[in-house]
Image (tube, rainbow, N blue to C red):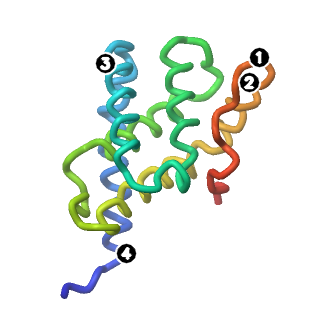
Amino acid sequence: MTDLNFNELNQDIENAYEQGKETAEKLLKDPDKMELFLQRAEQVMQNIPFIGDKLSMLPVMISFLKSYIKNEYREAPVTVPVSIVAALLYLISPKDIVPDKIPVLGIVDDIAVIYLAWKYVADDLELYQDWRKANGLEVVGFEEAPAAE
């Protein structure tokens, strides 16, 4: 059995996230492609065991992106949607650092990339949730999302 080098894995996860940012910037400029992308991301999330319970920040991220591409909410810096899309790109990509076919470990890298993005955008997503509440809109599941460090 090969020993896992967690520092190397962490670096690989951060590199994968950074690589997704360029694609994310391009994707955010095309609302039709973004809509299809978000539909695909939601489908992938439904197929990942326990993601709904453990990663409740994903619906918040997707809600933010939908509001962003409809020009309903643009209070956040562009780095916020770019970070979210980059993380979602990794989530739905068939090429992972740890292949999804490996039970349990296969989703660990996906979760790590989503969590990394969450750490960068948590404050902005809290402001987004405040905006939704102030405008009489439903506030999507945010309560169980991990606190950003």
Q: Earlier in the sequence, mark 4 or mark 1?
A: 4
Question: Which secondary structure, mark 1?
Answer: loop
Query: In front here: 61 or 15?
Result: 61
Residue labelled with disc 4: 7
Q: Quadrant of residue 148?
A: bottom right
Residue labelled with disc 1: 135
Q: Earlier in the sequence, mark 4 or mark 2?
A: 4
- Residue in the picture at 70% in, 38% down: 126
Residue type of the residue flagged with mark 4: Asn
Query: In front here: 19 or 145?
Result: 145
The location of residue 137, given as percent across then percent down, is 71, 20
26 lies left or right of 99:
right
40 lies left or right of 141:
left
Residue type of the residue flagged with mark 1: Asn
Q: Are marks 3 and 4 in contact (CB under 8 Å)?
A: no
Q: Are marks 1 and 3 in contact (CB under 8 Å)?
A: no
Question: Which secondary structure, mark 3?
Answer: helix
Residue labelled with disc 2: 131
Question: Which secondary structure, mark 2?
Answer: helix
